[in-house]
Structures are given as structure tokens and as C-alpha cells.
Image (tube, rainbow, N blue to C red):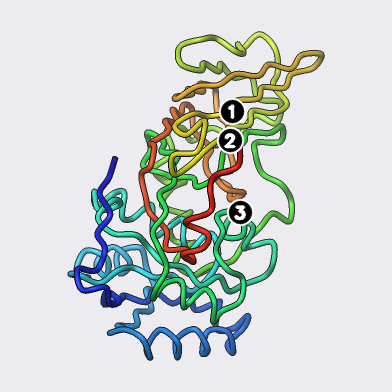
């Protein structure tokens, strides 16, 4: 389990505030309020990363500053991905003030982040860290909640977008360039799916849906385990596993609702208690649901 640092003196740690430019356009007032609360309670450095290399550099040179995201679920995901790549994910809990459209903040709500900017900022300053599982793939990507592969290449028209759009567009282009195959996505993907070595689906029949969902976090029952659902015409398979591998001619998928691929193969593995999130102390003390 990763060890998450806490202030030795009981006061707030210095913060690196990673500001999503789109958040300022979407709700500049919430951004301003959150910045005022954070700057009034801690030593804050505000950063505006505009490229993947800038984000990496800002995080790698942050020193003792805790990363705090003001923006969408995707912004949080990308920061966690960069920290994972730098092997710094468990060094400190991260903070989040969710700003964006409701559909861009579903993960933040599920994790327990307050939706109101003042409460979210106060949780960053005086909340308690809670650890969560993370889904990590062998291509360097991460997912906070889950992954799914669906017919039509794993992409939904009108799917969620947002969150540092100039930065994320460059990241998406890089992911496409580094994909394992240049082949087009199969709209009726025939893929092989294995969960902890157990065969769940093979290439002899098309698969309509593969859903991988993290089942627990922070010591809750089921932590470190994926719920796996494979749906094919006339068949439905469910399983629990720590690792899932998918191989196919070329398929796309969604990580936390955002498209990735196409690729020829991916393996996803659960990393238990991999990262920490600052939440209101009352949320931290509340026992997990049975």
C-alpha cells in the first residue's frame, strides 16, 4: 500500500494548483471562488499547463506541493496518469475542485468530492486523504472507475469531452500515434477476453460489450477486484478478476467515458489503494457501505 504524506504540523501543505483553462470558460466564478479559498489558506502556486510536456514538467518540479486540480474528471485522470508515469502517484494525496458540465463530473461525484467550490476547496485544505484503487493498462493509461469496449469501436457519438481541450487533443493524438495497430476499428469486434487467465470470450463470435468496473476502494470490501461483464449475442458472462486481457484485430475502448485506441491488445490490472484523494473529514470517517 502506498504511504500518503500528511502535514507534520497539522497545517495545510503547499499546493500546486493545476487550472483547467476550459473551467474558466465554463464557470469562471467558481474557479475564482476556489482560488480565493485555497490562496487564503495555503501557499499556492497556480499553473496553466498547455501541453503534455508542460504538465509532466510542472508535476515533476512541484517539490513538496500537493497537486490540486480545478476542472473536470478528465483533468483529474490525466494528472493521475502523469503521476503514475513518474512513479509519484502514491507520494501525496491529490485535491480536486470539480468545475465543468454535470456530465464531465460524474466520477468526482462518485468519489465523494463536494460539488460546491467552497466545500471542495476546504476539503483540500483541511480534509483527510482516502485511498482508492486504480485501473492501469499496459499502455500507460489509467482509469478511475472503469473501462468498456462496445460495438462500433468503443466510441459513442456525442460522448463526453472537455478538460484542458488543447492539451487533451494533443494527448489523444499521441495515444493514436502510439497505438499497436494502424488498422481501422472493427465495428463488430471479435476479440479474445481473459480474466485472470480464464477465457470469457473468443474470436469466433462478435462481442457487443465488455465492461470492467472497479468494485471497491480504500479498504472497502472487494477492493483490488474488477467486476467483468462480457455481453455477446445470446450470452452474458460475469466474473471477478484482478487482471483482464483483451486481444483483437483492432478495437477502441472508453476509459472513464473517454475514447482510446484503436489497439490490438490491452491488459488492465487493478492497483489496490494506489492513490489518495483529499475529502471532507466526515466523508473519510464514514464507514464503507456493506
Nearest the eye: 180 or 217: 217
Taking the image as shown, residue 123 lies to the left or right of residue 22, namely left
Q: Position of residue 283 (x, y in %)?
A: 53, 59
**Secondary structure state at the residue bearing disc 2:** strand
In 3D space, how far apart are the residues under numbered discs 1 and 2 (Cα atoms)? 5 Å
Kindly identify which residue carries mark 3: 110
Nearest the eye: 252 or 27: 27
What residue is rendered at 31% in x and 49% in y? 84
**Mark 1 vs mark 2: which is more N-terminal?**
2
Nearest the eye: 31 or 43: 43
Q: Position of residue 240 (x, y in %)?
A: 55, 21
In 3D space, how far apart are the residues under numbered discs 3 and 1 (Cα atoms)? 17 Å
Kindly identify which residue carries mark 1: 227
User: Dot 1: within a 10 Å radius of its alpha carbon, few (fewer than 14), some, or many (20 or more) residues?
Assistant: some
**Residue contact between numbered discs 1 and 2, judged by CB atoms under 8 Å:** yes
**Secondary structure state at the residue bearing disc 3:** helix
Q: Position of residue 261 (x, y in %)?
A: 52, 40
User: Dot 2: within a 10 Å radius of its alpha carbon, few (fewer than 14), some, or many (20 or more) residues?
Assistant: some
**Residue contact between numbered discs 3 and 1, judged by CB atoms under 8 Å:** no
Taking the image as shown, residue 267 lies to the left or right of residue 289, namely left
Q: Quadrant of the N terminus?
A: top left
**Secondary structure state at the residue bearing disc 1:** strand
The numbered dot on residue 158 is none
In 3D space, how far apart are the residues under numbered discs 3 and 2 (Cα atoms)? 13 Å
The numbered dot on residue 213 is 2
**Mark 3 vs mark 1: which is more N-terminal?**
3
Q: Is residue 147 above or below residue 265?
A: below
Amino acid at each position: 500500500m502506498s504511504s500518503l504524506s500528511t502535514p507534520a504540523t497539522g497545517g495545510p501543505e503547499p499546493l500546486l494548483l493545476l487550472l483547467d483553462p476550459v473551467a474558466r470558460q465554463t464557470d469562471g466564478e467558481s474557479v475564482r471562488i476556489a482560488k480565493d479559498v485555497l490562496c487564503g489558506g495555503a501557499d499556492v502556486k497556480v499553473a496553466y499547463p498547455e501541453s503534455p510536456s508542460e504538465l509532466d514538467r510542472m508535476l515533476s518540479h512541484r517539490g513538496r506541493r500537493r497537486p490540486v486540480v480545478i476542472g473536470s474528471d478528465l483533468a483529474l485522470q490525466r494528472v493521475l496518469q502523469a503521476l503514475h508515469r513518474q512513479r509519484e502517484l502514491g507520494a501525496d494525496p491529490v485535491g480536486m475542485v470539480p468545475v465543468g458540465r454535470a456530465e464531465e463530473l460524474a466520477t468526482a461525484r462518485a468519489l465523494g468530492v463536494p460539488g460546491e467550490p467552497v466545500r471542495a476547496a476546504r476539503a483540500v485544505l483541511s480534509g483527510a486523504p482516502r485511498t482508492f484503487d486504480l485501473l492501469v493498462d499496459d499502455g500507460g493509461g489509467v482509469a478511475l472507475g472503469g473501462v468498456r469496449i462496445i460495438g462500433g469501436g468503443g466510441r459513442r457519438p456525442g460522448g463526453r469531452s472537455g478538460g484542458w481541450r488543447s492539451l487533451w487533443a494533443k494527448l489523444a493524438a499521441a495515444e493514436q500515434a502510439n497505438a499497436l495497430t494502424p488498422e481501422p476499428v472493427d465495428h463488430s469486434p471479435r476479440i479474445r477476453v481473459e480474466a485472470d487467465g480464464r477465457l470469457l470470450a473468443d474470436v469466433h463470435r462478435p462481442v457487443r460489450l465488455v465492461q470492467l468496473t472497479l468494485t471497491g476502494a480504500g479498504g472497502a470490501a472487494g477492493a483490488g477486484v474488477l467486476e467483468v461483464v462480457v455481453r455477446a449475442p445470446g450470452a452474458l458472462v460475469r466474473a471477478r478478476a484482478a487482471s483482464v486481457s483483451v486481444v483483437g484485430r483492432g478495437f477502441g475502448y472508453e476509459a472513464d467515458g473517454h475514447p482510446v485506441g484503436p489497439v490490438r491488445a490491452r491488459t488492465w490490472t487493478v492497483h489496490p489503494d494506489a492513490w489518495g484523494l483529499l475529502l471532507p473529514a466526515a466523508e473519510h470517517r464514514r464507514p464503507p457501505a456493506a
